[in-house]
Image: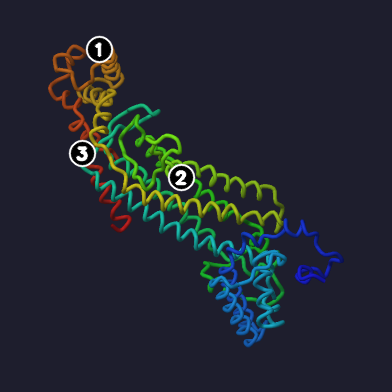
Amino acid sequence: MSKKQATWGGRFNETPDKLAQEFNASLSFDRRLALVDIEGSMVHAAMLAKQNIITTEEGESIRSGLLKIRDEIVSGKFVWKQELEDVHMNIESRLIELVGAVGGKLHTARSRNDQIATDVRLWLRGELSGLLAEIKQLRKVLVSEAHKHLEPAAVLPGYTHLQRAMPVLLSHWFLAYYEMLTRDAGRIEDCLNRLNESPLGAAALTGTGFPIDREMTAKALGFERPMRNSLDAVSSRDFGLEALSAIAIGQINLSRLAEDIILYASSEFGFAVLPDAFSTGSSIMPQKKNADIAELIRGKSGRVLGSFVTLATVVKGLPLTYNKDLQEDKEPLFDAVDTYRMSVKLMAAMLPQLKWNREVMAKAAESGYSLATELADYLAVKGLSFREAHHVVGAIVRDLVSSGRELSTLSLEELKKYHVLFSEEALERTKLQSAIHYRNSLGGTAPERVEQAVAAAKQEVGE
């Protein structure tokens, strides 16, 4: 009988087909869970000994064997065997080699079904906690850049429909992404709270007849509580879906930031200059400087979103409880976490090295009649209905477009031709550095408001 059959083969007369065995194996990717698998196994063994399901000596023997295996894995000396199918059986097989038949007692009152569900939760809990630290660092960078460019001279066009709309402070732009990243962190924190329950002890699907202590193992592994339903414990992967959803939204927000950088660094905009260290050239055009890192961050949003769709499709029609389909939960989780982490780290490294062309930004912010709304607001303050004020200023813009002039070139006499309510104060509304101060509502882009927002953000990230 083959080693493969020794695992679960008592029921079978034939050894597995080689191609089917390769297709069934998950070792190539689930070996990544080895350390959390050992962590869970040590806790399980300690619980078995405490409950007198195995002896104290047996528990210590299993623990020492698992510690030896952990050292072998960390040092790269562990010999992985593909024919043993997965990370669990590789570790168990090696444990039996080290400590003898007592190693086989480790699996008492446990199934690979609750074992893998526990492993994935442990791994994901650690990875999401690490992501929160990376996101916090990027949030600090965004706040730092907002503070660096806080003065009113650092202004650029705000856009709607990718058309110049109204001026905004560069600091205000940085803080917009800070707010998005703050919500991204909040979604991951929510996910962490919900996934922090222990499936261990649910066994294959119905629990076990052994007198186990699930409260003990949950506490020892840092979980808030054991999961309350054994069927749910082994079959649910909604915690993975929630994590992938949070990560996908986070990657999409990074994609939007990357898109702005790509646009602003183009010759057509000219607002920013890319750092050489985060750019590439062309194999044929010597003059090119491409925003490849930002483009890849943008492009990988499709990859991360694909991971969410993969797992959602896998679990969509699964009956209770465990099905082999659930083996497909790990690769999308692994890939999405890795991709998002690298994207966050790269963005945090790249942003401080961007150089901003303030003259070009300010010229663009003031052109294109971006201060037209200021004139309409001025007439509304003077008592004109906003709809009528909108019509008056629209006529001004129409005439200026025809003559190729900007709002800032208008004299008071010209303004009065359009409406008698215009006075000398209205001319301030056509000048960028004075007009920007009028956007002073809560959350607005007036320098005073942005300065308050920067101070609040710095306090939030502990700067």
Q: Residues under labels 2 and 3: Cα distance? A: 30 Å
Q: Where in the figure is residue 454, as x and y percent of width and height?
A: 27, 48
Q: Position of residue 202 (x, y in %)?
A: 66, 67
Disc 3 marks a residue whose amino acid type is: Pro
Sequence-first disc among 1 and 2: 2
Q: Where is residue 442 in the image (x, y as percent from the top left)?
A: 28, 41
Q: Is mark 1 on a helix, strand or loop?
A: helix
Per the image, the residue denoted by label 2 is 297
- The CA span between labels 1 and 2 is 43 Å
Residue 363 location, quadrant:
top left
Residue 22 showing in the rendered view:
yes
Label 1 neighbour load within 10 Å: few <14, some 14-19, many 20+: few
- Placement of 147 over or under 109, stated as above or below: above
Give the amino acid at mark 2: Ile
Look at 12% across and 22% down and name the residue there.
Answer: 424
- Circle nearer the viewer, 2 or 3: 2
* Left or right: 71 as drawn, with respect to 287: right
Query: Given the image, on which type of amino acid does mark 1 rest?
Result: Ser
Q: Mark 1 points at which residue?
A: 403
Q: Are marks 2 and 3 in contact (CB under 8 Å)?
A: no
User: Which quadrant of the rendered structure holds the C terminus?
Assistant: bottom left
356 relative to 427 in the view: left or right:
right
- Helix or strand or loop: what does disc 2 sit on? helix
Identified at 78% across, 59% down, the residue is 18
State which tag comes first along the sequence, 2 or 3: 3
Residue most toward the left?
424
- Tag 3 secondary structure: loop
Q: Foreground: 335 or 440?
A: 335
Q: Mark 3 points at which residue?
A: 152
Residue 216 is at least partly visible in this image: no
